[in-house]
Amino acid sequence: MSKQGKLYVVATPIGNLEDITLRAIRILAEVDLIAAEDTRRTKILLDRYGITTAATSLYDHNEAGKTPRIIERLTEGAAVAYVSDAGTPGISDPGYLLITESIAREIPVIPIPGPSAVVTALCVSGLPMDRFAFYGFIPTRRGRRRTFLACLSKERKSMVFYESPRRLNETLQDMEDILGDRKIVLARELTKIHEEMLRGRLSEIRGALGEKTLKGEICLILAGAGEDPPPQSDEIIDNLIGRLAADENLSTKDIVERIASESNIPKKKLYERALNVRRKPSK
């Protein structure tokens, strides 16, 4: 009887290399191959614990081409571990395709739990954590970002996002404009030397940051809406419509469809507001 391959999905430290489980160290040392998002970063971890297992890269741009080769190794009976740059694979990281292809072929997929930036930031945020929603990276284009945020206006759970330091100030401003001056926690460089936690309302955090640009990985935890969140004002809707029309040059119909598909605003109201915005002379 041929040996059955196994795929281990291994969580690795998000910063401090001591944040790794004994089981993860053992698995990484015992498998036949480690598939890593970035072999250079993974080598630092492997060297720290004297692990000499062969590694191959598997990241966004080669995942489609590389996955079949790794699947072939698994079907031949190899044990493979997948690790991302940091944290738990698949959480806003590559690995989904490899995992789903393994499941489709009935290859055992075994989780090796450990660090996750989402849970690490949430557990010390001071915001409600009995229920939360993780939204990953916020849209980069401002029009899409503002539409995205408007669709979250009635979300009552604490919300967790990742954001780039380069867009942080703009994102915080958009959050305050669209969602109001809510409580927020900014977690930066978690478990690393320059770890920083900023807590306060959006206006307070923006004021504390000023014009400076932070460095490092950033996780944002935003308070959910109250029991009776206020309805979206015509001004907010008009700003969304105007931004989509200016930034993406969409037709009135496309704008209405876009916002309606991502929110609970009635199409009739959106058409009325869109026509009103279109009638206004440009400044």
Image (spheres, rainbow, N blue to C red):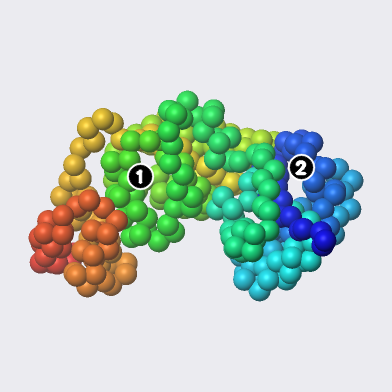
User: In the picture, residue 70 is in which quadrant?
Assistant: bottom right
User: Dot 1: what SS?
Assistant: helix
Q: In this image, 43 relative to 234: left or right?
A: right
The one nearer the camera, 97 or 245, is 97
Give the residue furthest to the top. 126
Which image quadrant is residue 197 in? Answer: top right
Q: Of discs 2 and 1, which sits in the foreground?
A: 2
* Identity of the residue drawn at 27% across and 63% down: 258
In the displayed orientation, state which residue is furthest to the front.
1
Residue closest to the eye, 259 or 71: 71
**Is residue 49 at least partly visible in the picture?**
yes
- Marks counted in the figure total 2
Name the image quarter holding residue 188: top right
The residue at which mark 2 appears reads as 24
Q: Position of residue 232 (x, y in %)?
A: 20, 45
Q: Which residue is mark 1?
A: 175
Residue at horizontal 13%, vertical 62%? 271
- Pointer 2 with pointer 1, Cβ within 8 A: no
**Percent from the top left, x then y, of residue 210?**
45, 41
What kind of element bears circle 2?
helix
Whether 108 is drawn above or below 208: the answer is: below
